[in-house]
Image (cartoon, rainbow, N blue to C red):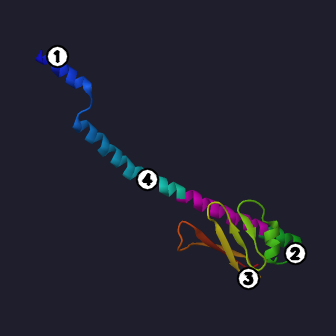
């Protein structure tokens, strides 16, 4: 009779120790997985921003080939198609769903594209000078 009571108890459910172990394992996995997921997400944003800079470089090159001299910002914007949407006449601002922001200082003839971290991380402010 005692053996029968013991077997019913062992079939009923999990012990407190087993539940605590599962909770500890879930905590450890969360501590490892969440930072890795955040890093992948930031890498994707950075890749999107680098693609935007590539699009602007290509647009600048196309506008330069058409004009045969350094293009104006409005001419670069005319060649820049897609997402993110770029606008501007004396400066270029590109915004997309991922918070991509690209701005420039107007008035110089050379086109230089740089990208630096801004205070509003994970957005990156990219400077386009020379249109």
Please report the residue visible at 81 percent of the width from the left and 78 percent of the height from the top.
72
Label 2: few (<14), some (14–19) or many (≥20) C-alpha neighbours in 10 Å: few
Q: Magenta includes 52?
A: yes
Instruction: Compute the Cα span from label 2 to label 4.
Output: 50 Å
First in sequence: mark 2 or mark 1?
1
Q: Where are the magenta residues, as a range?
A: 42-59
First in sequence: mark 4 or mark 3?
4
Q: Position of residue 36 (x, y in %)?
A: 45, 53
**Residue that mark 4 sits on:** 34
Label 1: few (<14), some (14–19) or many (≥20) C-alpha neighbours in 10 Å: few
Q: Are marks 2 and 3 in contact (CB under 8 Å)?
A: no
**Residue that mark 2 sits on:** 68
Q: Element type at marker 2?
A: loop
Instruction: Compute the Cα span from label 1 to label 4.
Output: 46 Å
Q: In the drawing, does residue 38 fall left or right of residue 89?
A: left
First in sequence: mark 2 or mark 4?
4
Q: Nearer the viewer, residue 18 or 40?
A: 18
Q: Is residue 35 above or below residue 126?
A: above
Q: Nearer the viewer, residue 114 or 83?
A: 83
Instruction: Compute the Cα span from label 1 to label 3.
Output: 87 Å
Q: Element type at marker 4?
A: helix
Q: Position of residue 69 (x, y in %)?
A: 85, 78
First in sequence: mark 2 or mark 3?
2
Q: Which image quarter: residue 110?
A: bottom right
Q: In the drawing, does residue 18 fall left or right of residue 4?
A: right
Q: Nearer the viewer, mark 2 or mark 1?
A: 1
**Residue that mark 3 sits on:** 106
């Amino acid at each position: 009779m005692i053996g029968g009571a013991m077997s019913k108890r062992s079939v009923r459910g999990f012990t407190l120790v087993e539940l605590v172990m599962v909770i500890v394992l879930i905590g450890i996995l969360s501590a490892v997985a969440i930072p890795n997921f955040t890093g992948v997400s930031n890498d994707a944003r950075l890749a999107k921003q680098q693609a935007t800079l590539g699009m602007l470089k290509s647009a600048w090159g196309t506008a330069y080939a058409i004009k045969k001299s350094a293009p104006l910002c409005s001419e670069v914007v005319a060649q820049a198609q897609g997402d993110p949407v770029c606008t501007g006449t004396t400066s270029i601002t590109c915004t997309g769903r991922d918070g991509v922001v690209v701005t420039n200082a107007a008035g110089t003839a050379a086109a230089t594209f740089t990208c630096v971290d801004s205070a509003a991380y994970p957005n990156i402010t990219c400077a386009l000078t020379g249109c």
